Image (cartoon, grey):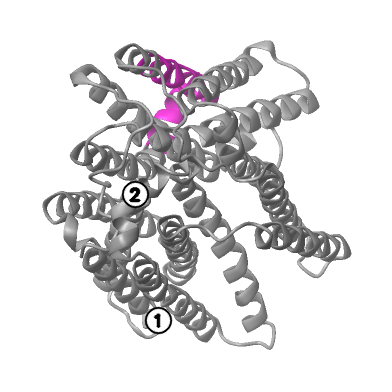
Amino acid sequence: MSAQPTAGGGDAPSRAAPAGALAFVALAGVALLGNGLKAVVTSTVLVGEAQFAAFLAIPVEHVATLMQAIVAGMVIALAAVPLLLQRFQARALAMAACVVAMLSFGGFALVDHLQPSAWQREIATFATLALGAGAVACLAPAAQALVLTWPTAVGRTTLTTLWTGAAPGGFLVAPQLVKFALPAVGLAAYFATFAVLPLVLLGLLLALGFALRAPPAADATDAALPVRVLVAFIAVVAGFEVWSTLGSVTRYLAPGTLAALLVLAVLAAWLARAVSALPAPDAMVGSAYLLLAALFVVNIATTGFFEAAYLTQRFRDEAFVADRSTIAAAAQIAGTFAAGALAHRRPAAQRALLQGFAAVTLAGLASYVAYPWIDARTYFLWTPAVAGFGSAGVTVLVCLAVLPAGARLPMLAALPSIAIMLGTELGLEALQVLFAVVTAPGTSYAIAYATLFAAQAAIVLAAPWLLATAYRRVTPANAGSGA
C-alpha cells in the first residue's frame, strides 16, 4: 500500500549516517544491551524480593514497597526521555546514563562491604538502585533513537528487531539469574556485574561515535514539542505513579490515595490543555501517534500478571507457572523475529501484518476467558505463547512504522519504549482496581477472573481500530512527502 509508512522507512532521512561493519556491530550491541539491560534489571527487582529482604534484614512486605518505588522511579525517568532527547543527542544521553548506572550499581555493591547500620543500608539501597534503574530505563529509548541514524531500511529493520527482541530475552534470562546466579554470588556481586555491563555499552557507544561519518546535525524538518507539554507529561506520569504506589501500599479508597487521585486529575487536565493548544500534526506524525496508541493499548491488556496469579492460586505450583512464563517469553522472541523477517521481505504488507499480529494477540487473550472452566494444563501452558507471539509482532512492526515520522520529530523514536512500560503499568493498576470492584460483592474468584480476562480481550479490541485509523490518515501524497 503506497499510502502507508513503510517498515523501516525506506526513504526516511537519517540524522547521522553511520557507515561500515564497525558501526553496524556497535549499533546492534547498543540496541541489544540498551533494551535488554532494562528488562534484566526490572525483572530482578520484581522477582528478587526475598533476596533483598535478606540483604536488608527487613520484612518481604516492606521490600515489596521499596521495589515498587524503584520501578515507579524507572517509569518517571522514562517519561523524562522525550524532553532530554530534545535537549541532548541520543548518544550523549545514553553515555551519561551508562556512567550513572555504573556508579549507582557499583555503589550498591559497596554497601555490602561497608556494613552500614540497618537504616543506612535501606536508604543506600533505595538511592543507588533508584538512580541505577532510572539510568537503565533511559538506555532503551536512547538506543531506539540511535537506530534511526542508520541510513538503510534493511539495517533499521534488523536493528529494530534486535532492540525489540532484547526485552523478552532479558525477561527470559533474569528469573534464571535470580534463581541460580544470585544465591551463588550474593546480591552485592550480582549488582557489581550490572556495573560492568554499562561499561561495555559505553565502549560500544564510543565505537559508534568513531564510526560516524559526520556528527548528528539537526534537520530543517525537526519540530520540537513545547517544553510545557513535555513537563506536563512528566508530571502526569509522576502523579500516576504516586497514586498507584499509595493505592498498593495502603488502600485505593484511603484518604491519601484519593487525594493523590485528585492531584492526578488536575495534572491530567493541565496536560490535556497543553496538548489542545498544539497545532494539528501532519498526517505522518499523526499516524505515528495512533500507532503508538495501539501499542499502548496492547500492553495494557498483556501484562501477564493476572493469569499467573490465577494459576498460582488454583494449582499452588510455582514451577508450572514459571515454565508457562518461560514459554511465553520464548514465544515473544519468536514473534519479534517473525515480524522482523516478514517486514523485511514484505515491507508493502505492513498494514496487513500489523492487523494479523493484533488478531493473534486478541485470540490469545480471548483464550484466557475459559481458564476457570478448563482443567488441561497443556492449554494453560501454551495459550500465553499465542498472546506473546502476537503482541511481540505488533511491537516490532509499530516501532518500524514510526521510524519515518521520527525523521521529522526525532523524539518519536523513543516513544515506543514509553508506550510499552506505561501501558503495562496502567494495565496492572486499572485491572487490579477492576478486580477489587468485581470481588467486592462477594463474586467467586472464578467469575471475577473470567471477567478480568474478558476485559483484557475487550481492551485490545481497540488496537485494530487504532491501526486502521492510523493508516487512513496517511494519503499517497503525504507518504511521498516524508516517508
Q: Looking at the image, which residue is at 21% across and 49% down?
A: 340
Between residue 59 and residue 72, name the one nearer to us. 72
- Position of residue 42 measured from the top left corner of the image (x, y, whole percent): 51, 41
- Position of residue 290 measured from the top left corner of the image (x, y, whole percent): 45, 64
Q: Callout 1: 10 Å neighbours few (<14), some, many (20+)?
A: many
Q: Looking at the image, which residue is at 29% across and 73% down?
A: 359
Is 383 positioned to the left or the right of 38 in the image? Answer: left
Q: What residue type is labelled 2?
A: Gly
Q: Looking at the image, which residue is at 62% across and 17% down?
A: 107
Task: Identify residue for label 2.
Answer: 482
Question: Of discs 2 and 1, which sits in the foreground?
Answer: 2
Magenta segment: does it hold 183?
yes
Q: Looking at the image, which residue is at 69% across and 88% down?
A: 441
User: In which quarter of the view is residue 367 placed?
Assistant: bottom left
Q: Callout 2: 10 Å neighbours few (<14), some, many (20+)?
A: some
Q: What residue type is labelled 1?
A: Val
Magenta segment: does it hold 174?
no
Is 114 positioned to the left or the right of 193 in the image? Answer: right
Between residue 435 and residue 92, name the one nearer to us. 92
The secondary structure that dominates the magenta segment is: helix
In the displayed orientation, state which residue is furthest to the left: 345
Q: Point out the stretch of residues depicted in magenta.
A: 177-204
- Position of residue 375 measured from the top left corner of the image (x, y, whole percent): 32, 79
Tell me the element at label 2: helix
Which numbered disc flags the more N-terminal residue, 2 or 1? 1
Task: Identify residue for label 1.
Answer: 369
Query: Can residue 395 be seen in the rendering of this structure?
Result: yes
